[in-house]
Amino acid sequence: MSFKPLKFKSLPEDELITRSATFREQLATRRSIRHFSTREVPMEVIENVIMTASSAPSGANQQPWTFVVVKDPKIKSEIRVAAEKEEKAFYDHRATDEWLADLEPLGTGWQKPFLEDAPFLIVVFKKIYGMDGDQQFKHYYVNESVGIASGFLLTAIHQTGLVALTHTPSPMGFLAKILNRPENEKAFLLVPVGYPAEDAEVPVLTKKIFEEVTEVF
Ligand code: IYR
């Protein structure tokens, strides 16, 4: 165990207010995008957003995640075919009427062209346990840790000036197969990254207000 002094600069309160308000405004413009342009994105950007995500806090700092980057059109196409098979079953008969009604405002359907159009797919895998050679060891708070890292990832993509989608085809087992992941890794989230299509549209949605999401004691 070794420690070093924290580098921390205390800011005046008015600056805290301005900075938090500015960041709030910036993040409020983030939208889930389902219509992507095929325009290329530099790999360096993908590396930066992934390393931002990987700087997230995690249980015992074990960083129980792997970010699999897919840019090969053949693999993207394989993922699209497999995802659409699951999604078609979901929309045709697996989803309850209540679920389909809840999704109606989003205008989603079984077809997922963004899985081929987006220049990069980042598939976030959670490690349900660690491996040291052929020895298994425990990971802690895996869902919380990978959820926080995924939030960092989406925030980084947005602040970079690109768009993303949190896509969760269900079940997601096909991703571990196609991407050849070891036994201890389970797909957590599939994030297409890129530019929006010229004609991209987003549903008109509202977010809950402060009083609806907060209790202050
Ligand atoms: N996975 C499906 C359905 C879906 C479910 C929820 I909850 C959403 O917020 C959006 C979609 C799909 O991707 O279409």
Image: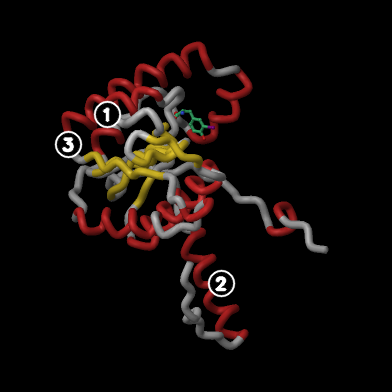
Residue 180 disc label:
1
Q: Residue furthest top?
A: 93
Kindly state the secondary structure of the residue where label 2 is placed. Answer: helix
- Inter-mark Cα distance, 2 to 1: 43 Å
Which residue bears the numbered disc 3?
A: 72
Q: Nearer the viewer, residue 161 or 47?
A: 47
Q: Residues within 10 Å of mark 1 (few under 14, many from 20)?
A: few
Which x, y percent locates residue 42?
19, 55
Could you classify mark 2 by the number of other residues whose Cα lies within 10 Å: few (under 14), some (14-19), or many (20 or more)?
few
- Residue 171 position in % (x across, y down): 45, 23
Q: Tell me if label 2 and label 1 are in contact, CB under 8 Å.
A: no
Amino acid carrying mark 2 in the image: Ala
**Discs 3, 2 touching: Cβ within 8 Å:** no
Point out residue 76 in the picture as x, y percentages from the top left corner: 23, 32
Residue depth check, mark 1 versus mark 3: number of the one nearer the observer: 1
Q: Nearer the viewer, mark 3 or mark 2?
A: 3
Tag 3's secondary structure? loop
| Disc 2 residue: CB within 8 Å of ligand 1 | no
Q: Are marks 1 and 3 in contact (CB under 8 Å)?
A: no
Q: As shown in the figure, which amino acid type bears the numbered disc 3?
A: Asp
Residue at x 47%, y 65% (from the top left corner) = 26
User: Which residue does the numbered mark 2 point to in the structure image?
Assistant: 21
Q: Quadrant of residue 140?
A: top right
